[in-house]
Structures are given as structure tokens and as C-alpha cells.
């Protein structure tokens, strides 16, 4: 029996996560509050909300201008496929 | 939502249908005053939302105001089928020459009201229909256009009523039809409708039931009748399981995952979609299944909400498996519900492949949903499998194949 009860993972590059402007944009973009801005302006991933991800790509759009593609939304149920 | 008799009488009175000079009270001493005002023999009737009040001693006859007070005191203290009375109705004992029946009920199949009339009143109309079918007149009518004089006359006359009685009954029947439509009722019944010695008619008892969903449209009437917003008037109090279902639904604003009703079967249901819940519930029963609950999901509930509902159902004593079924969804996402119900199983330590008898929700985001279900080995069905077949498969997993 598969026992893993998490369906989605979100990864953000460390450098990007420390950027208050990017953290703000991600926090504003996500409709299900997967991103939150910490007191010092950095980025927090809200683990509790991860599985609410609706695969809307809004977080990817929010960092579109960054050529390093610092945000990855991973579908754990689909052999780790990355939301493009 | 059902009305007490005293409220139904008030609605009838406002519609211009003659009623007796009754009074409602919650106080025995006031019952005596009402009886004094009436000035003759009275009937004291318990105001409860349950049947069998006559047999239970909830209806008593009084010749004097003192007797009315004594009866009122007894009746106010008398619970009937577990219901405490709201009060008592003090009614003049009318000298009735004949009792009739007039009612309107909502025909859910035809989606129209149906007027029912009988010159045999005072007993259940079902009994009259069985024993004297020629004494029951029926006619469907529009819920947009008013019932015409001709239509009303036709229903009454079809039972053999003629002459002055027919002429006097037509406006009563018409007003009853109007109040039914105007107030979004599903039942409006006057039984008995008494014909007095002078040929006039008077409503002697009434039952009314308003469509629950329409309460908001009639908030003024309900407020005037003193019906509190918190009064659900359901046939029974919600069980702890049902209250927990309400909490699940209230946990966030996204979608619906609630409206839970408890039953005592072994197949938990996580079902929904615009009438689909009722269809699925019936289908499960038709295939010999024993539902543990009824519920409704839809409108794209969050994963947490779908998970909460599935957990509630899975934890209900006696539930062996759950069936997750909806008709084809467009505003609910298959993958979100799949995540929710699988999460519920896993967090409770169950194997989703074992606990979910069938997952039959085709529609929006089904490719993603089916990937999730496949990964956890859950038996799922797409739109090529009917709701009826899905219900059959779910029942078979619990009860075994029919022999
Ligand atoms: S894809 Fe949408 S829901 Fe998922 S993390 Fe990004 S913004 Fe949030």
C-alpha cells in the first residue's frame, strides 16, 4: 500500500526565496496560500496548504521574467512531473 | 419547513379563507379567557409537529371556560411522540353538517402543484382515495398562472358536489391554490373544511409545509408568525454525526461537502452533483446496498474539505468502505476530490485501494484525478460507466455478487 499522503511539492531556489519582492509576488499570486511572506520579507512555504495546489501556474507566471525559473511545482503523484 | 396548526390557520385567514374564531396560547389561564370570549363549547388542541395527537390525548373537548383551562394545563404538560407542545389552540366547537377536504401538494415528478378535493373530510385523504376513489378530485395546475374559476370548479364538481356548496367552495379552493404558489409551499391542506348549518364553510384544521430553500423569500411572513431563523423544524434533531458534517462544510468557503444525513448501513457515501446524490443514494439501495449516510459534495470543495467529509464517513461505526461518486462534473475538480478522499484513508491508516469501493467522478481534470487514483490502486470508473452501474459495483464489493 502506498502510504505517502502528499501530492504536491513546491521548491523555490534559496536566492529567490530571500528576495522580498519575489516573495511578495508569489504570496499575492497563489490562490490557495501556499506561499507566505515572513516578518523579514523572506518566503515561507505553507506545508499545510501544499495539497490544495490547483496547478494554476500563477506562481510560475509571477516569476516568468526570472531566467533561472526559481519556482518548481512538482506533482508527486505523477512520478515527480514538474508543472511547466 | 412545517407550520404549526395555529400558524397555518393564520396563513389561511390572511388568504381570505374563513376560519373559526380560535385563539392560540401557551398559558392555561389565557386558554380560559379565550374560551370565555368564544362563549360556548370549545376544543383544546395541542400544537405539536407530529401526528397522533388525538390518540395521545392532545385534543380535548370543553363545555366551560374552567374545563378549557384544566384541559389546556394537561395538554401543555403532555409530550407527544417526544415533542413538547408549542402551545394550545382554543377553538369553538363548530356545529358541522359535513366535513370536506381541500389540499394542494407539490408533484415533484410533474413539477407542478396538484389540487386535491374531496367531500369526505376529517380523515386521511389517502384513506378516502383508497376506499372511495370517486370521491377524490385532482387537477394539476400551473405554478405561474393562477388557478381559474373553471379549473377549480372542475375539481370540486368531479366529486359530485353541486349547487350552492359548489359555488361557495370554488373561491376557497382558488385561494388555497394561490396561497400555495405565493408562499412556495409543498403542502397546503385544510382538513376538515366544515360546512355549517347556514351553508357557509370554515377551515377547522390546516397543515402546511413551506419549501425549506424558500424560507428567505418569506422572511417577512415567518417573522410575523414568530418563526425564528434558528428553527429548522426538521422531523428529528440532527445527530452528532450530522452536526460534525455541518462543521466540515463550514470549515472553509470553498464548495460544498456536507448536508449529511445519518443512516445505519455499512457503505459510506461521498456523493454529489445537482440531484446526483439522491439518484446515487437510490441506486445503492436499489442494488441491495445499505448506505451509512447521505451527503452532498459539489462546487469544488477544497482538498481539506473533501478529506474532512471522507474521514467523517470512514470513521462512522459500521462503515466498511466508501463509494465516491458524482455525475459528470464541470465545477468540481476530479483530482481535488481524489486527493481529498485518498488523504482521508491514509491519515486514518487505511489502504485507499481497500477502503474506496469505487471512485466514479468523471469530468474536469479527470486525467490528473485518474493518475492519482491509479497510483494508489483505487478502482475508478470514467463516464462510460453509468451512475447506476457504479452504484452496483460499489454494493457488490461489500455485499458480494447477487445470487
Ligand atoms: S500552481 Fe497555483 S496553486 Fe499551485 S502553488 Fe502555484 S500558484 Fe499556488
Image (cartoon, rainbow, N blue to C red):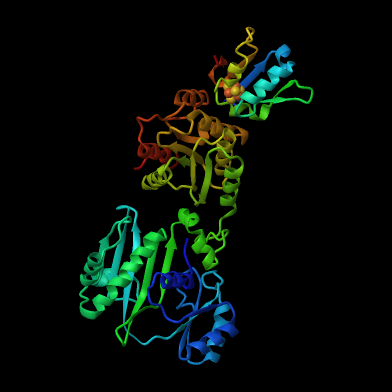
x%, y% of residue B11?
Answer: 44, 69
The residue sitting at 35% across, 76% down in the picture is B193
x%, y% of residue B51?
Answer: 45, 70
Q: Ligand 1 falls in which quarter?
A: top right
Q: Using residue B205 as the reference point, say whether residue A67 is left or right of it.
A: right
Q: From the viewer's perspective, is residue A77 above or below residue B175?
A: above
Q: From the viewer's perspective, is residue B105 above or below residue B298?
A: below
Q: From the viewer's perspective, is residue B164 above or below residue B15?
A: below
Q: Using residue B160 as the reference point, say whether residue A32 is left or right of it.
A: right
Q: Which residue ends up furthest to the top in the rendered image? A: A67
The residue sitting at 73% across, 18% down in the picture is A20
x%, y% of residue A46?
Answer: 68, 27
Q: How many marks?
A: 0
Residue A8 visible within the image? no
Along the viewing direction, whichever of B259 and B263 lies nearer the viewer: B259
Quarter of the picture containing the C terminus of chain B is top left
Q: Using residue B319 as the reference point, say whether residue B158 is left or right of it.
A: left
Q: From the viewer's perspective, is residue B106 above or below residue B130?
A: above
Q: Quadrant of residue A67?
A: top right
Residue B246 visible within the image? yes
Along the viewing direction, whichever of B215 and B338 lies nearer the viewer: B215
Amino acid at each position: 500500500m502506498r502510504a505517502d499522503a502528499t501530492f504536491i511539492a513546491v521548491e523555490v531556489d534559496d536566492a529567490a526565496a530571500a528576495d522580498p519582492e519575489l516573495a511578495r509576488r508569489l504570496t499575492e499570486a497563489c490562490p490557495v496560500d501556499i506561499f507566505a511572506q515572513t516578518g523579514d520579507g523572506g518566503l515561507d512555504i505553507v506545508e499545510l496548504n501544499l495539497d490544495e495546489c490547483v496547478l494554476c501556474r500563477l506562481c510560475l507566471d509571477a516569476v516568468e521574467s526570472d531566467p533561472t525559473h526559481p519556482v518548481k511545482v512538482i506533482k508527486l503523484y505523477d512520478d515527480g512531473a514538474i508543472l511547466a | 419547513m412545517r407550520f404549526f396548526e395555529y400558524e397555518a390557520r393564520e396563513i389561511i385567514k390572511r388568504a381570505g379563507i374563513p376560519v373559526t374564531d380560535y385563539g392560540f396560547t401557551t398559558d392555561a389561564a389565557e386558554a380560559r379567557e379565550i374560551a370565555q370570549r368564544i362563549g360556548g363549547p370549545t376544543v383544546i388542541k395541542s400544537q405539536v409537529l407530529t401526528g397522533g395527537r388525538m390518540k395521545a390525548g392532545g385534543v380535548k373537548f370543553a363545555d366551560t371556560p374552567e374545563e378549557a383551562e384544566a384541559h389546556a394545563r394537561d395538554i401543555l404538560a403532555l409530550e407527544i411522540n417526544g415533542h413538547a407542545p408549542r402551545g394550545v389552540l382554543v377553538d369553538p366547537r363548530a356545529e358541522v353538517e359535513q366535513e370536506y377536504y381541500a389540499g394542494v401538494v407539490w408533484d415533484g415528478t410533474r413539477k407542478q402543484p396538484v389540487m386535491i378535493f374531496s367531500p369526505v373530510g376529517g380523515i386521511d385523504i389517502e384513506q378516502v382515495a383508497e376506499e372511495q376513489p370517486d370521491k377524490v378530485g385532482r387537477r394539476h395546475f400551473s405554478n405561474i398562472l393562477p388557478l381559474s374559476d373553471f379549473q377549480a370548479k372542475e375539481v370540486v364538481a368531479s366529486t359530485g358536489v353541486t349547487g350552492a356548496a359548489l359555488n361557495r367552495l370554488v373561491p376557497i379552493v382558488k385561494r388555497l391554490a394561490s396561497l400555495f404558489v405565493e408562499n412556495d409551499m409543498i403542502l397546503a391542506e385544510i382538513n376538515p373544511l366544515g360546512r355549517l348549518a347556514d351553508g357557509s364553510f370554515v377551515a377547522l384544521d390546516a397543515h402546511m409545509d413551506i419549501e425549506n430553500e424558500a424560507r428567505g423569500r418569506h422572511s417577512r411572513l415567518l417573522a410575523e408568525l414568530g418563526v425564528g431563523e434558528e428553527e429548522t423544524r426538521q422531523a428529528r434533531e440532527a445527530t452528532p454525526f450530522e452536526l460534525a458534517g455541518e462543521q466540515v462544510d463550514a470549515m472553509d468557503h470553498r464548495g460544498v461537502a456536507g448536508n449529511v444525513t445519518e443512516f445505519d448501513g455499512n457503505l459510506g457515501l461521498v456523493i454529489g452533483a445537482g440531484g446526483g446524490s439522491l439518484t446515487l443514494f437510490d441506486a445503492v439501495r436499489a442494488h441491495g446496498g445499505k448506505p451509512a449516510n447521505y451527503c452532498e459534495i459539489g462546487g469544488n470543495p477544497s482538498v481539506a474539505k473533501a478529506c474532512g467529509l471522507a474521514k467523517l464517513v470512514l470513521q462512522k461505526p459500521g462503515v466498511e468502505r466508501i463509494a465516491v461518486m458524482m455525475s459528470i462534473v464541470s465545477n468540481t475538480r476530479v483530482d481535488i476530490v481524489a486527493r481529498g478522499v485518498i488523504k482521508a484513508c491514509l491519515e486514518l491508516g487505511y489502504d485507499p485501494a481497500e477502503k474506496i469501493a469505487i471512485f466514479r467522478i468523471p469530468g474536469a481534470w479527470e486525467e490528473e484525478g485518474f493518475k492519482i487514483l491509479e497510483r494508489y490502486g483505487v478502482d475508478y470508473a470514467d463516464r462510460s460507466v453509468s451512475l447506476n452501474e457504479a452504484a452496483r459495483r460499489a454494493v457488490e464489493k461489500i455485499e458480494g455478487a447477487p445470487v
